[in-house]
Image (spheres, rainbow, N blue to C red):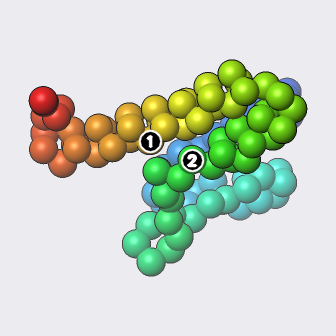
Amino acid sequence: MLGLAGQGTNPLVLGDLKGEHVDLVKAAGGQVITLGRGRGYLNILDPGQAIEVAQLLEDQGRDDAAVRARADAHGRRLNMVVALITISRNMPPTD
């Protein structure tokens, strides 16, 4: 991982359950986000910066791009809800 970072690749460590990569990531100037019960959270329905971006696009008169940005954010949230339902029920939702 350190060798790849030295060559310009941005390594991502997803799911470091034992924490063996924390020291290396911090030493390389990376960001460690701790998640788990009682240790941070991840809101998968948060639209992030999409709403602010859409407003900036509207302010610049780019209404079509703003509509696409909002629709993309909505679509991502919808996909996450469907994924959560599928995981919870062991089958995708139906009509």
At a point 87% along the width and 32% down the height, the residue shown is: 60
Q: Position of residue 83 (x, y in %)?
A: 30, 38
Circle 1 is placed at which residue position? 77
Q: Amino acid at mark 2?
A: Pro
Circle 2 is placed at which residue position? 47
Q: Which class describes the residues within 10 Å of circle 2: few (<14), some (14-19), or many (20+)? A: some
Q: Position of residue 9 (x, y in %)?
A: 77, 29
Q: Earlier in the sequence, mark 1 or mark 2?
A: 2
Image position of 89 (left or right of 83): left
In the rendered image, the residue lying farthest to the bottom is 38
Front-lying residue, 27 or 10 = 10
| The N terminus sits in image quarter | top right
Figure disc tally = 2
Q: Are marks 1 and 2 in contact (CB under 8 Å)?
A: yes
Task: Examine the image and state in which quarter residue 8 appears.
Answer: top right
**What element does badge 1 sit on?**
helix
At a point 66% along the width and 42% down the height, the residue shown is: 50
Would you say residue 3 is visible in this rendering?
no
At a point 33% along the width and 43% down the height, the residue shown is: 81
Q: Position of residue 93 (x, y in %)?
A: 16, 34
Q: Determine whether 8 is above or below 41 in the image.
A: above
Q: Position of residue 73 (x, y in %)?
A: 55, 37
| The C terminus sits in image quarter | top left
Task: Examine the image and state in which quarter residue 24 appears.
Answer: bottom right
